Amino acid sequence: MKVALLLFLVIESSVLYGQTFEKQELITFGSRIDNPVTMEVIRTKDVLSFYADNKSIYPYRLELEFTMFRNLTPMKSTEQFVLHSGRNLLFKLTIVEPTQSPGYSYSIRYRMGNPDEKADENFSYLLPGAIGKTLKVHRVATANTFVTYKGTFTAQKGDTVYAVRKGTVAALPDMEKSTDRILKNTLEVRHADGTIAVYSNVYSTVPLVRYGDKVFPGQPIGIVGELDFLRVNVFRFLEEGKLAPIEMKYAVNESTSMAFHELDETVVEHPVPVIEKELTDREIKKFRKGNLYPIAKE
């Protein structure tokens, strides 16, 4: 069963000089997995186990409605579930009278997103550059002024890109396999609160991470590509699967966070308290020993 879904996001604008703004643009989710949710029922003696497989990194909401139900308990009619990535056990049914055949039929509907995830719009993100490197806001010259694009920094080909937050790699540039992704040729990381970081102009021939990998704040995850900028935007889910950008706040040091429009030239720090905020106790121990993830050579 295939369900067509459209997810929309609005690219907002930020201008530091002059009166030229980015054009507001409405776009759809870049690509989608065909039939991301599949069902399987396994019988073991007198018990039927209902499973749903989610092929996406993103959660899906599933509604299952029984249209026929016979010789099974407990009674089911309409059920709703949040499906996480991978295999999900929904419920088990027991055959009431083993000498008689059970009977059931059902229909399913699903859509992307988890209503229980609440985006933390005050989260302090790391800057995506190397510690000690000066990151400059990228400005594009026009006829009469300069235009800036949110989350866009001047960079050079080969610069290392660092994760701004802990999460799971949801898409890589030029992925051959179909995947749920926001933009083409981007590296995308899904965070614990459901937000997604989209890294643009990331070099894809030298992958530092793989699809589905867990990445940590401050971990090297990619290389800047051919263009002279690095852009990182974060999006949150709205109702009905729509997306909207978040006004990111950057941890410029242990005590100060700044919005993008407040930045100009900033020496990068990756404050330890900001990094450890999202880590488990075990991850903190590994981080302090220096073996939580491979260290990049600048």
Image: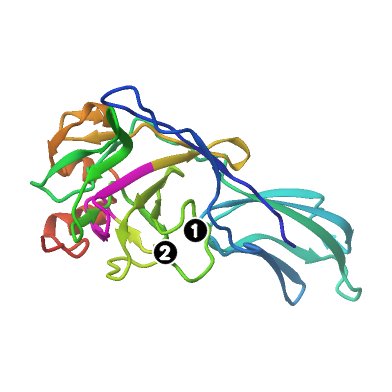
Mark 2 vs 1: CB contact within 8 A: yes
Q: Mark 1 — residue?
A: 57
Q: Does residue 19 lie above or below 244 as drawn?
A: above
Q: Nearer the viewer, residue 82 or 176?
A: 176
Q: Secondary structure at mark 1?
A: loop
Task: Find residue 230 and name its label.
Answer: none
225 in the magenta segment: yes
Q: Residues within 10 Å of mark 2 (few under 14, many from 20)?
A: some
Q: What is the distance, in whole Å, between disc 2 and disc 1 at their CAs?
A: 7 Å
Amino acid residing under circle 1 = Ile
- Extreme residue toward the left, this view: 132
Q: State left or right for residue 30 relative to residue 255.
A: right
Image quarter where the C terminus lies is bottom left
Q: Residues within 10 Å of mark 1 (few under 14, many from 20)?
A: many
Q: Does residue 162 lie above or below 238 as drawn?
A: below
Amino acid residing under circle 2 = Gly
151 in the magenta segment: no
The magenta region covers 216-233
Residue occupying image coordinates x 17% and y 35%: 252
Q: Mark 2 — residue?
A: 212
Residue 131 at x, y percent in the picture? 11, 48
